[in-house]
Image (cartoon, grey):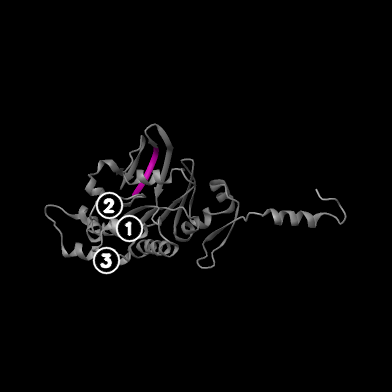
Amino acid sequence: MSRLAAESVTLAYDRRVIAEDLTVAVPDHSFTVIVGPNACGKSTLLRALSRMLKPTAGAVLLDGSAIDSYPAKQVARTLGLLPQSSVAPDGITVGDLVARGRHPHQGLLRQWSREDERIVAESMAATGVEALADRYVDELSGGQRQRVWIAMALAQQTPLLLLDEPTTYLDIQHQIEVLDLCAELHEEQGRTLVAVLHDLNHAARYATHLIAMRDGRVVAEGAPADVVTAELVERVFGLRCQVIEDPETGTPLVVPAARRSRTATAATAGAARPAGSPAP
């Protein structure tokens, strides 16, 4: 049984239904990536899996029981979330924000400890923000803030980690660094990761399990090599392409079909006409 699953859920905002009768099971110890076009329901599904959005029908299950049946602190010790848009309290430093990831582990009988201090330091080092510890979060660039939020999620030390577009605001170097870090968390620590990504090539490179969505339903899921085909990309994204082997990783690499310029089209048409024939 998967530790985290959605069974026949209907997801809606007020009366606007985003997905209906949707069933998804996240494979344990996988790096699952959800992909699909804008407004297909992928971030909505992630919000439901994290208990931020309650289904109007069906249930999200955590360890076999409805996720909303657990106390909030117990869920927070099992499942961490990096939402798409995070807002830090005014005047909070990087170190203090990352330390908030340890709050679910605090209680009347367990206060702040050296272990908490160590985990916070390691989380900041892993995301490259240790030098920013005394800076105010609202002074940072978008990319720096994103890495701080990831550090806080890491400090939470949950076996399940959900990330909604974790590479937002990051340049290409930091995108790869963040995704490499996610891969290490999955491979070396055995964590189950679920991420929403817009970049299909990043998804194909890093995911062990891929879920492709369109119009609030799952179109295909499985290993990237089985899911990412030219036919699937055109059906889900409406994009004509070729799918080749990534020379670095051997994973699927999507190469969009090139736009033919008017000059090239006219030259091709001219070359195809017999000599002396009138121009069209």
Residue 158 visible? The answer is: no
Whether tag 1 and tag 2 are in contact, CB under 8 A, the answer is yes
**Other-residue count near label 3 (Cα within 10 Å), few / some / many at <14 / 14–19 / ≥20:** some
**At label 2, which amino acid type do we have?**
Ala
Front residue of this view, candidates 104 and 5:
104
- Label 1 and label 3: CA atoms lie apart by 17 Å
Q: Is residue 9 magenta?
A: yes
Whether tag 1 and tag 3 are in contact, CB under 8 A, the answer is no
- 237 over 158 or under it: above or below: above
N-term-proximal mark, 1 vs 3: 3
Front residue of this view, candidates 188 and 48:
48
Residue 41: x %, y % from top left: 43, 43
Q: Nearer the viewer, mark 1 or mark 3?
A: 1
N-term-proximal mark, 1 vs 2: 2
**Other-residue count near label 1 (Cα within 10 Å), few / some / many at <14 / 14–19 / ≥20:** many
Residue 246: x %, y % from top left: 54, 64
**At label 1, which amino acid type do we have?**
Arg
Give the residue pinned by disc 3: 122
Count of residue discs: 3
Query: Magenta part of the protein: which range?
Result: 3-10
Give the residue pinned by disc 2: 88
Direction from residue 273 to residue 14 in the image, left or right: left
**At label 3, which amino acid type do we have?**
Glu
- Label 3 and label 2: CA atoms lie apart by 21 Å
Give the residue pinned by disc 1: 145
Residue 256 visible? The answer is: yes
Residue 123: x %, y % from top left: 28, 63
Q: Is residue 256 magenta?
A: no
**Other-residue count near label 2 (Cα within 10 Å), few / some / many at <14 / 14–19 / ≥20:** some
Residue 37: x %, y % from top left: 49, 47
Front residue of this view, candidates 113 and 57:
113
Q: Which residue is located at x 41 percent, y 45 percent?
A: 24
